[in-house]
Amino acid sequence: MPKAIRVHAYGGPEVLRHEDVEVGKPGPGQVRLRQHALGVNYIDTYFRTGMYPAPSLPFVLGNEGAGEVVELGEGVTHLKVGDRVGYVITLGGYAEERIADAKFLVKLPGGIDYDTAAAMMLKGMTVQYLLRRTFAVKPGDTILFHAAAGGVGLIACQWAKHLGATVIGTAGSKDKAELAKQHGCDHVILYRDEDVAKRVKEITKGAGVPVVYDGVGKSTFMSSLDSLAPFGVLVSFGAASGAIEAFNIGILAPKGSLYVTRPTLNTHISRRETLEEIAKDLFQVVGSGAVKIPIHSRAKLAEAAEVHRALEGRKTTGATILHP
C-alpha cells in the first residue's frame, strides 16, 4: 500500500506520521499520479501547525510535486497515461501516490526533470506572479527582496536580474549573503546586524525602492515600509516570522502614499489560462538557462519531520525536495 505523511493533530514536526494510505480511483476530472519528487515549502508548516486550517483531520501535507499519470478519471482529455506533470495543489503532496484534479496539472517540457519541477512549481510560479504580475519589474528598477537566500529568493534574484533590475536582498548570515550574490543579488543586507531601511536608503542615495517583496511578515513589516520610495508597493506574500498584525492604514500616508498588497498564487492560478501562462513563462526562463533552480537538500519522504525542523530553524537555503 502507498505511504504518505499525514497530520492527525496540529502541532510541531513530531505530528508528521509516515503511514499507509488508501489512494482509490480517480473520479471525474481527476487522475491518479505516481509521484517522483515532492516540494517542501514554508507554507507546509502553516498547515501542520493549524495556522492555515485543513478542511478536515487527518490530512496529507504538501502543496507541490511532480510525477507521472498512471490512471485517468472520466472526462480528462488534456492528459494521457504516462504524461509527466508538475503541480501546485493545496494539500496531498507528501505521498507516494495521490489523486489530483487534472485542471491543476501542467505537462512538463522534456528539458525539465522531476526534481527540478518539484523544486520550482510553487516557488517559481510564485516568483513569476510577484515579478511579472503584482509589480512588473522593468530594466533599471531597484528592488528589495527579503530572505534572498531562501528557495523563493534565489529564484527571484536570478529572474529580477534577468529582467534588468538591481537587486537588494536581505539574509541572516554571511554564508547566505554570499549565496544570494552568486544568484544575482547586487547588494545583501545582513538583517541581524544592520538597519535594513537605513541601508536601502544608503544604497539608493536616499530614494528608496519602488517595491519590496516580503515573505517574512511580522518582523520585517515596518522596515519594508520604511524602505519604499513615495508611491511604493509592499508586496507581502508570506509570514515566515509570524503574521503581520493589524495596523493603522493611516501610517501609509506620511511614509509616502504607499500601497500594500497581499497576493496569493492560488488566486492567480484559479483560472486555467493564467496557470498555463505562468507555467509557460517559468518553463521558458528555466529552459533558457537564465534562471537555475537550486536544490540544496534531498531527503526521503519518511524524513519529513527532520526536514521541517531544519526549515523552521532557518537552516535551509534554496529548495528542499522529498523522494517517495
Image: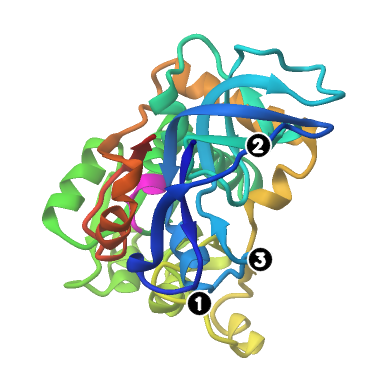
Relative depth, front residue between 180 and 44? 44
Separation of residues labelled 3 and 2 (CA atoms): 17 Å
Q: Say whether marks 1 and 2 touch (CB < 8 Å).
A: no
Please indicate whether residue 40 sits to the left or right of residue 29 in the image.
left
Residue 243 got which mark? 1
Q: Answer above or below: position of 302 versus 25.
A: below
Separation of residues labelled 1 and 3 (CA atoms): 23 Å
Label 3, residues with CA under 10 Å away: few <14, some 14-19, many ≥20: few
Residue 99 got which mark? 2
Q: Which residue is pictured at 43% across the width and 50% down the height? A: 19
Front position among marks 1 and 2: 2
| Residue 78 locus on image (x, y percent) | 77, 17
Instruction: Name, please, the residue furthest toward the left.
Output: 174
Residue 56 got which mark? 3
Range of magenta residues = 147-153
Residue 221 got which mark? none
Please state which amino acid type lies under the numbered disc 2. Ile
Q: Answer above or below: position of 41 versus 259.
A: above
Q: Answer above or below: position of 280 versus 208.
A: above
Q: Answer above or below: position of 302 versus 294.
A: below
Label 1, residues with CA under 10 Å away: few <14, some 14-19, many ≥20: some
Q: Which residue is pictured at 30% across the width and 43% down the height? A: 318
Q: Earlier in the sequence, mark 1 or mark 3?
A: 3
Label 2, residues with CA under 10 Å away: few <14, some 14-19, many ≥20: many
Instruction: Name, please, the residue furthest toward the right.
Output: 75
Q: Which residue is pictured at 61% across the width and 14% down the height? A: 83
Q: Quadrant of residue 300?
A: top left
| Residue 33 locus on image (x, y percent) | 59, 28
| Residue 204 locus on image (x, y percent) | 36, 58
Based on the picture, tell me whether residue 150 belongs to the magenta stretch: yes
Q: Earlier in the sequence, mark 1 or mark 2?
A: 2
Please state which amino acid type lies under the numbered disc 1. Ala
